[in-house]
Image (tube, rainbow, N blue to C red):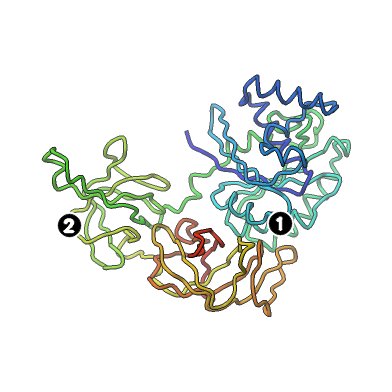
Amino acid sequence: MDILRLATAGSVDDGKSTLIGRLLYDSKSIFEDQLEAVERTSRDRGEEYTNLALLTDGLRAEREQGITIDVAYRYFATPRRKFIIADTPGHIQYTRNMVTGASTADLAIVLIDARKGILEQSRRHAFLATLLRVPHLVLAVNKMDLVDYDEATFERIKDEFTSFAAKLSVGDLTFIPISALHGDNVVERSANTPWYDGPSLLHHLENVHIASDRNLIDVRFPVQYVIRPHKSTDPELHDYRGYAGQVAGGVLKPGDEVMHLPSGLTTRIKRIDTADGPVDEAFPPMSVTLLLEDDIDISRGDMICRPHNRPQVTQDVDAMVCWMSDERPLVPRGKLVIKHTTRTARAMIKELQYRLDVNTLHRHEDAERLDLNEIGRVRLRVTQPLFADDYSRNRATGGFILIDEATNATVGAGMIMENR
């Protein structure tokens, strides 16, 4: 059974937490004692409905303020699919949290309040989802009950967002009118929207096709660990040398010719081992151990690819960076540590080309720094070559994080762009 990773985003009070609570409740993915606690709290607050948002606002500060602060991960499953939900905050000061939650998502749900329409925050969330190359985007127009399930309101929001999305590179866009509070079109189709002939939200989540979103063309295997069971008494394991890691792209099979970077030496795959024994092929995001026919000096941070399909080998990196530190800004000539796939190296900010206004998409080319939650285009110089692809081609080999060497804190997340 495959797993769909989804991120929710929306402005404050658009009903994200209620929607997730409704999904968990209507798909029977919560325990009775959880529900009883939520019902009791709702009664104590004098609320006329069971407040399903309380299921997801786990931090006490969130419950007290009635807002979502951190990225909360929720898990549920239906007979068709397993789901991991990253519930990301709506406030602009939590942009970095949304970047964290959406960076691994297959699908993003952007909630819009039907009464308010598309706000600046809605545009920002949609832009971030496309910047992070989330392949599928769902615009859930919520609180349809408060506009009497009016078709014209839904169509107006749909048209406005479609024209805005034309400026972005949205792969797959779906619009669904819902009421998270009452459950309209969340798990079951609603009789209140006879004019809507599309699927319910859960039906769409269960059936959206994600297998082809992964890059199965470019073979990329960043080596994470070299396995040498020295002390084994098993004669077969005496000369065992395996290279463990997670497949970041392409399909690997025993007998395939592969190339090792940085040496450029070629060999063939002898065997592919997993925790459950040998397999005939490996593809993203499987974690496997490769055994090769020839003895090559390979270590952590190296890359295995195809001889005629190699990643870029470069020490100069152009990237969009979301800055995540409130302790220090990103400034030219600043020194950091970069972690890209399994390789860690030192890096220097050579230049800040522009800061991007995420609300208007305007480029500020005179910007001298990036502060917390700001996004900009930067050029980095790295002490060791990276084996990288454009983020648009492969999120695993096109993404990286920046680390403050003194504090070991993650201060930035980056997406490698074409040199242009």
Which residue does the image show at 68% across and 26% down from the upper left?
26
Q: Is residue 393 left or right of residue 226?
A: right
Q: Quadrant of residue 329?
A: bottom right
Which x, y percent locates residue 86? 61, 43
* Residue at point 80%, 50% (across, down): 157
Q: Position of residue 387 (x, y in %)?
A: 39, 65
Locate residue 354, reporting x and y percent.
Answer: 64, 75
Mark sitting earlier along the chain (2/1): 1
Above/below status of 188 relative to 209: above
Which amino acid is tagged 1? Gln
The answer to whether marks 2 and 1 mark residues whose Cβ atoms lie closer than 8 Å is: no
Judging by the rendered image, the residue that carries numbered circle 1 is 93
Distance Cα–Cα, label 2 vs label 1:
52 Å
- List the residue tagged with mark 2: 294
Q: Amino acid at mark 2?
A: Asp
CA neighbours of label 2 inside 10 A, class few (<14), some (14 to 19), many (20+): few
